[in-house]
């Protein structure tokens, strides 16, 4: 059997697994197919479509990397660059986009992507240069100006962005309103309802019921007496931040379930105590009439305020274990300095541990690592690595954050960059400092900008200028001194 026939057979097995509701096995067969050098265009297209439906960028990357068809197909080269970017392989993605920048058909898309990548990396001048190139390339279209407005919005220059959008609309009506700008303007005005509305206009994630005709819930009245399943989306931080809104749906549908990532099921136990079933498999057994992406919930329920009160809790037995292990001596500060490097969101948000380790210079301070995965290797590179206390078994089991939040309950303060730990400890109401970029993500830009509207005990300290972590830590040192004096 040749490789194309083998790949076709794996695709058939994947479809059969899906029919039996065995989604992980279906994806495994797709990966088998992607490991082959597919030279049949129809087979490759079928594989890519199936992988896209399952949001499996890894399968798509593997298939495109191995297929000899890509070498002479600019559309496949563009798709490959897009997949590399989504998987955090930015230098490879950038090279792919640059190679396509002069292409007659795909060049504008490549320039747009290059501008976005430069923006998220903090290369603002480069980002603006790509926006100008795009506008020069397509003077009769507003794409370059809308990219420029997106960059200006990221910088918080909302008046400039609004003026740029006005110029864009003089060229041609926009395909859709500039929700990225309108959301930030709503935040600036303290208009929570407006912010949730514009957020709901984002591109919707794929539903967890691939291949079914279960509709998205668009009107809350339609859920009356029906079975509704809310499903998590985006990163762990988003899921932890927005699960607070699910209990507001209790009593409207006949059945309400939350299809949650299995690693988050235990830490979200308090949500399950409100009348919501938390589950991680076999969504079809719930016979949903509608499904609803998590970050659409606040708009659908008409939320116009945000309660910053705690809504998750740590397991008492776990807290007791960690209190005994950590002990009572010293002023105990938990630290997180590195986010997941896969994804554009990580550009500029992670910081060098060496800067954060300056907290150990304060008398009686103990630094306790809450870091997991990438970033741990920085401890060994410190001049004195023993200033960081590490518990290697922290959340080493199948569940995420159960140990982290329990340990955090035994600390005096948690200091973290913009990562999921900020949401986990914030949701418990624990004292925390979020160290943010000079121009942070939208959720940390509500006025007053040194306080989180999401978590009552989270203080926000921004870089004074772009990439100035030293300046942010200077402010952090002052804040910690103040807290210790008032303790």
Image (spheres, helix red, strand yellow):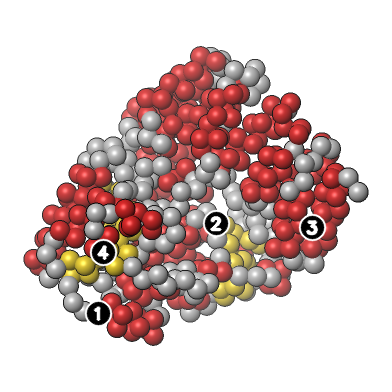
Camera sees residue 160: yes
> How far separated are the C-alphas under marks 4 and 3?
50 Å
> How far separated are the C-alphas under marks 2 and 3?
24 Å
In front: 17, or 457?
17
- Residue 55 image position (x, y, % from top left): 65, 51
Q: Where is the C terminus found, in terms of image quarters?
A: bottom left
Q: Is residue 341 left or right of residue 24?
A: left
Q: Quadrant of residue 289?
A: bottom right
- Residue 126 image position (x, y, % from top left): 41, 25
Residue at x-position 70% and y-position 63%: 24
Q: Which residue is mark 4?
A: 386
Residue at x-position 26% and y-position 51%: 354
Q: Which residue is mark 2?
A: 233
Q: Secondary structure at mark 3?
A: helix
Q: Which residue is mark 1?
A: 327
- How many marks the image carries: the answer is 4
Counting residues from the N terminus, which is met first, the one under dot 2 or under dot 4?
Answer: 2
Counting residues from the N terminus, which is met first, the one under dot 2 or under dot 3?
Answer: 3
User: Are discs 4 and 1 less than 8 Å apart at CB?
Assistant: no
Residue at x-position 65% and y-position 17%: 104
Q: Which residue is mark 3?
A: 14
Q: Quadrant of residue 362?
A: bottom left
In front: 155, or 377?
377
> How far separated are the C-alphas under marks 3 and 1?
51 Å
Counting residues from the N terminus, which is met first, the one under dot 4 or under dot 3?
Answer: 3
């Amino acid at each position: 059997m040749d490789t194309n026939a083998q790949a076709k057979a794996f695709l058939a097995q994947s479809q059969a697994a899906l029919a039996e509701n065995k989604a992980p096995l279906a994806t495994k067969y797709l990966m088998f197919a992607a490991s082959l050098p597919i030279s049949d265009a129809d087979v490759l297209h079928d594989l890519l479509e199936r992988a896209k439906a399952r949001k499996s960028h890894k399968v798509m990357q593997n298939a495109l990397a191995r297929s000899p068809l890509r070498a002479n197909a600019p559309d496949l080269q563009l798709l490959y660059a897009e997949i590399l970017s989504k998987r955090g392989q930015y230098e490879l993605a950038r090279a792919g986009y640059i190679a396509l920048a002069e292409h007659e058909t795909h060049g504008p898309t490549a320039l747009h992507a290059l501008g976005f990548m430069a923006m998220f990396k903090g290369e603002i001048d480069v980002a603006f240069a790509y926006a100008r190139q795009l506008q020069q390339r397509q003077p009769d279209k507003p794409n370059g100006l809308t990219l420029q407005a997106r960059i200006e919005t990221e910088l918080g220059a909302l008046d400039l962005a609004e003026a740029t959008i006005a110029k864009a609309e003089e060229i041609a009506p926009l395909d859709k309103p500039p929700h990225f700008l309108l959301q930030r303007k709503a935040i600036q005005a303290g208009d929570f309802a407006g912010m949730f509305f514009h957020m709901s206009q984002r591109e919707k994630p794929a539903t967890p019921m691939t291949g079914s005709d279960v509709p998205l819930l668009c009107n809350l009245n339609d859920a009356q007496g029906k079975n509704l399943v809310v499903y998590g989306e985006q990163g762990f931080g988003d899921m932890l931040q927005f699960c607070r809104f699910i209990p507001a749906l209790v009593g409207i549908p006949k059945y309400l379930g939350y299809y949650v990532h299995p690693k988050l099921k235990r830490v979200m136990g308090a949500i399950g105590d409100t009348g919501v079933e938390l589950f991680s498999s076999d969504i079809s057994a719930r016979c949903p009439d509608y499904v609803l992406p998590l970050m659409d919930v606040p708009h659908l329920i008409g939320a116009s305020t945000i309660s910053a009160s705690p809504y998750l809790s740590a397991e008492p037995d776990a807290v007791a274990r960690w209190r005994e292990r950590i002990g009572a001596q010293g002023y105990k500060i938990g630290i997180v300095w590195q986010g997941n490097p896969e994804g554009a969101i990580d550009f500029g948000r992670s910081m060098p541990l060496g800067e954060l380790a300056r907290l150990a210079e304060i008398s009686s301070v103990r630094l306790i690592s809450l870091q997991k995965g990438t970033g741990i290797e920085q401890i060994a590179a410190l001049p004195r690595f023993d200033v960081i206390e590490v518990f290697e078994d922290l959340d080493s089991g199948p569940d995420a954050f159960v140990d982290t939040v329990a340990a955090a309950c035994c600390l005096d303060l948690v200091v973290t960059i913009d990562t999921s730990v900020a949401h986990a400890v914030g949701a418990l109401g624990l004292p925390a400092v979020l160290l943010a970029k000079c121009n942070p993500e939208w959720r940390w830009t509500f006025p007053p900008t040194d306080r989180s509207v999401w978590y009552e005990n989270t203080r926000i300290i921004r870089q004074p200028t772009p990439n100035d972590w030293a300046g942010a830590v200077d402010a952090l040192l002052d804040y910690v001194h103040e807290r210790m004096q008032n303790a």
